[in-house]
Amino acid sequence: MAHAGAALDLLMTDDEDEAQRLAGELDRLNRERREDTVAALELAEGLLTSEQRAAPLLVVASEEISSGIVGLVAGRLVGVHHRPAIAIQIADGEGRASCRSIDAFDITALLRRHDDLFLRYGGHRAAAGFSIEASRLPELRERLVADAAERLTPDELTPTIEIEAELPLAEVNGELLRRLLQLGPHGIGNPTPRFLARAVQILNSRVVGQDESHLQFTLKAGRVTWRAIAFGLAEHAVPDGDAADIVYTFTRDNFRGTLQLEVLDLRAAA
C-alpha cells in the first residue's frame, strides 16, 4: 500500500521538490521489494527437498514469505522449474497463497476439484489465490501434488523457450533495453521478449543462492559486456572464459536498480 500511496501522491503533486522526494521514496520502496523477493525466492528454494523439486507441482509455505510478494515467488518458481507452483505465507494460523501455472495446466480448476480445503479461493487458468487453515497444509500438498501427477505428462513438464529473434549481444545497449521495457508491463498476454545470442564469452562466473542453484557472471561480445543472472542453471554452467550460446531477456538488478540480462538457458557454443 505504501507503493500505491506514494505513486498517487507523485501523480497529483505540483511541487517539484515534493515530486523529487516522492520519486526517491518510490525508488527506495521498489529496491526493497526486489531485495525481499530475491530473499524469499532463496528461502523457497531452500525449503524444497530434491523429491519435492521433481514433483509435478511445487508447494512452499513459510512465515517468512511476505504476503506482498507471494505471487512473485510463485511466478519465479514456475520460471525456474517449469511446473505449477504455490507460495504460501503463514500468519495467525492461516495460510494465504498465490498460485502460478504453466500453459498445460489450469490451476484454478485444480483448486475447484479440492474446494473443501479452502476458506476462500479464486482465480483463472494461469493464476489463482486461496486461504487455508495452516493445520491443513500437509493435506493440501499431498492432494494437489497427487492430482497434478495424474494430469501432467513428462513432456508437459519439459521446458521450452520461444525466442523472439536472434539478437547478438554486441548489438544490445542500454537504450535498446529501455525501449523494450517501455513495451511492458509484461504478463500472460504480453510476455517478456526473449532473444538468442551465440558465442558469448562467459567471465567471472560464480554460483550463488542459498541452495547454490543460480549463476552470476559477466557476458562479453566484442567490446560489449553485461552483468547477468541465470536462475536455476548452476548445473549447466559453462567453464569460465569459454563461449556459450544463450537465450536471454532483460531485468532490473535486485540491489542496484540497474538493467541486467537474465539468462534463461545456455550451452557451450557449437
Image (spheres, rainbow, N blue to C red):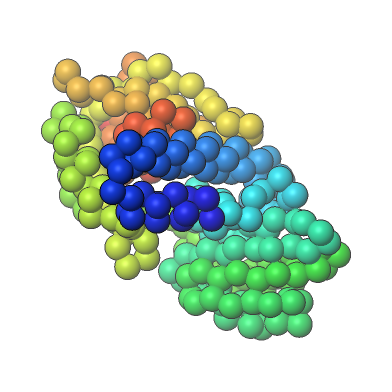
Residue placed most toward the observer, 132 or 161: 132
How many labels, in total?
0
Viewport quadrant of the C terminus: top left
Seen as rendered, the residue at the extreme front is 15
- Rendered residue at 33%/55% (across/down): 12
Q: Is residue 159 left or right of residue 59?
A: left
Residue found 22% across the figure and 40% down from its top = 177
Vertical placement of residue 220 versus 211, above or below: above
Residue 165 at x, y percent in the picture: 18, 49
**Where is residue 47 shown, x and y percent of the image?**
71, 45
Outermost residue, left side:
171
Residue 119's place in the image compared with 184, above or below, is below
Q: As rendered, which of 68 and 95 lies closer to the eye?
A: 68
Q: Residue at x 44, y 49 (%)?
A: 6
Placement of 241 over or under 195, stated as above or below: above
User: Residue at horizontal 68%, vertical 58%?
Assistant: 88
Residue 27: give x, y in percent of width and height: 41, 38
Q: Is residue 42 left or right of residue 160?
A: right
Instruction: Inspect this view and state whether residue 115 appears.
Output: yes
Q: In this rendering, does residue 59 appear at all?
A: no
Q: Residue furthest right?
A: 135
**50 lies above or below 258:** below
Q: Quadrant of the N terminus?
A: bottom right
Q: Left or right: 164 with respect to 65? A: left
Q: In which image quadrant can residue 41 be found? A: top right
> Which of the 4 image quadrants contains residue 90?
bottom right
Residue 181 x, y percent position in the rendering: 26, 47
**Could you tell whether 83 is left or right of 163 in the image?**
right
Residue 186 position by quadrant: bottom left
Q: Nearer the viewer, residue 32 or 145?
A: 32
